Amino acid sequence: MGSRLRELPFVQQRQQPYVLFGAERTKLYLFLDHRRASAVSGILGVQPDAITGDVVITGDLDLKLRNALRR
């Protein structure tokens, strides 16, 4: 269970989970903290257009939103 929880990028495990067995039910206790996991990476460039000679702005943006609404 702990190794699977470590695979989630938006939670961090505070302590090991444990299971409490009762007569009629079983409870699983997880001790988790929220962790920020979103990332933004990008680059912006300026170059002349090959045909018109005007300045053209180019760029690349990599946006990874993970659990942005914390639900």
Image (tube, grey):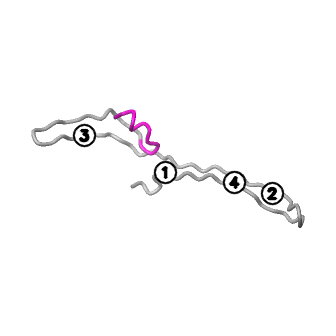
- Label 2 and label 4: CA atoms lie apart by 12 Å
Residue that carries the numbered disc 4 in the rendered image:
60
The mark nearer the N terminus, 4 or 1, is 4
Query: Crowding near pointer 4: few (<14 within 10 Å), some, many (20+)?
Result: few
The stretch in magenta equals 1-11
- Looking at the rendered structure, the secondary structure element under dot 3 is strand
In the image, what residue type sits under mark 2? Answer: Val
Indicate whether residue 32 is drawn in magenta. Answer: no
Q: Is residue 38 above or below residue 55?
A: above
Q: Is residue 24 left or right of residue 56?
A: left
Position in image of residue 15 (x %, y %):
34, 33
Q: Is residue 5 magenta?
A: yes
Instruction: State the separation of the CA atoms marked 1 and 2.
Output: 31 Å
On residue 66, which mark appears? 1
Residue at the spot 65% in from the left edge and 54% down from the top edge: 61
Image quarter of residue 27: top left
Secondary structure under the numbered disc 4 in the rendered image: strand
* Mark 1 neighbour class, 10 Å CA radius: few under 14, some 14 to 19, many 20 or more: some
Residue 28 on image: x %, y %: 25, 40
- The Cα atoms of the two marked residues, 3 and 1, are separated by 25 Å
- Report how far apart the C-alphas of labels 2 and 3 lie in the structure: 55 Å
The amino acid type found where label 1 is placed reads Arg
Mark 2 lies on residue: 46
Quarter containing the N terminus: top left
What residue is pinned by disc 3? 28
Give the position of the C terminus as an image quadrant.
Answer: bottom left
Query: Is 46 above or below relative to 4?
Result: below
Q: Measuring from the top left, give residue 62's x and y in whole percent.
A: 62, 52
